[in-house]
Amino acid sequence: MTVGRIRNRSEHRFLVDLQADLRSGAYRPSPARRKLIPKAGKPGQFRPLGIPTIRDRVVQGAAKILLEPIFEAQFWHVSYGFRPGRNTHGALEYIRRAALPQKRDKDTRRNRLPYPWVIEGDIKGCFDNINHHHLLERMRKRIGDRRVVRLVGLFLKAGVLTEDQFLRTDAGTPQGGIISPLLANIALSAIEERYERWTYHRKKTQARRKSNGVAAAASARDSAEFSNRSSPNTCRSRTFR
């Protein structure tokens, strides 16, 4: 359905009919339309977008308004991607501050070392490979209304329509969907939770060592896996894929 057809029928009638379909359970999202756009700085490479219909964009926008405040409360404070009120400039400022010498440690009475490494990584095909089952399971833990989770599942399984064929979507959430960045953040928050558990247990181990008269080990940011202490005032960069 085009914008022109909606206007001819009246926006009010369009929304009333859509609301009725949602309440009755008759609503089914249409396949997203596949569109390839060039990747910036990568000649010959394209990013596949899945453009939802206007009808589906309205429903996705409403679902995002409902879901975003719930999951925003659990996202990591240093996560900046696709989040309201956050952007690349904020992420760069956080990295800049992290690279500066830290305040004096009250236990060692020495200045804490800055983060000596900046690690740039890329999850290849992140949007295209999100596991539907794990994503929906994470949502069920936070969302009591199963109809909302079911609606998200319908979006994920709606498929993609190219110029000449229909493609099933057994994994991933289409780039181009209004709700897709939020769904990606929900899926990726599992990594944040895993890291927090790792640092929590590491700090507990340090506390035990300290109570036994052994000097506490370095904090997580100075762990051997990610740091090079030969130049404590230099912030280095490493890229991996």
Image (cartoon, helix red, strand yellow):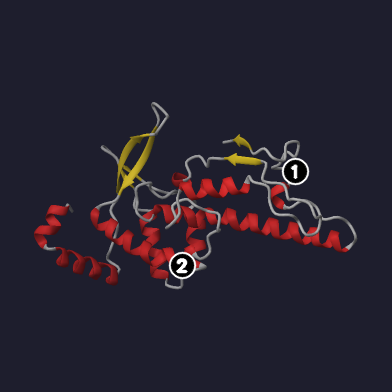
Q: Where is residue 55, by image quadrant? A: bottom left
Q: Residue at x 69, y 49 (%)?
A: 221
On the image, the x and y values in percent for residue 24 come to: 27, 71
Of the numbered discs in the image, which one, if any, rests on residue 70? 2
Q: Secondary structure at mark 2?
A: helix
Mark 1–mark 2 CB contact (< 8 Å): no
Q: Residue at x 85, y 60 (%)?
A: 210
The residue at the far top in this view is: 43
> Is 42 situated left or right of 164 in this image?
right
Q: Say which quadrant the C terminus sits in.
A: top right
Q: Secondary structure at mark 1?
A: loop
On the image, the x and y values in percent for residue 106 come to: 77, 59
Residue type at mark 2 is: Ile
On the image, the x and y values in percent for residue 89 come to: 47, 47
The mark that comes first in sequence, 1 or 2, is 2
On the image, the x and y values in percent for residue 152 come to: 39, 60
Q: Residue at x 39, y 34 (%)?
A: 39
Q: Nearer the viewer, residue 180 or 164?
A: 180
Q: Nearer the viewer, residue 222 or 20?
A: 222
Q: Which residue is mark 1?
A: 224
Q: In this picture, is 233 found above or below 56?
A: above
Q: Residue at x 70, y 60 (%)?
A: 200
The residue at the far right in this view is: 213
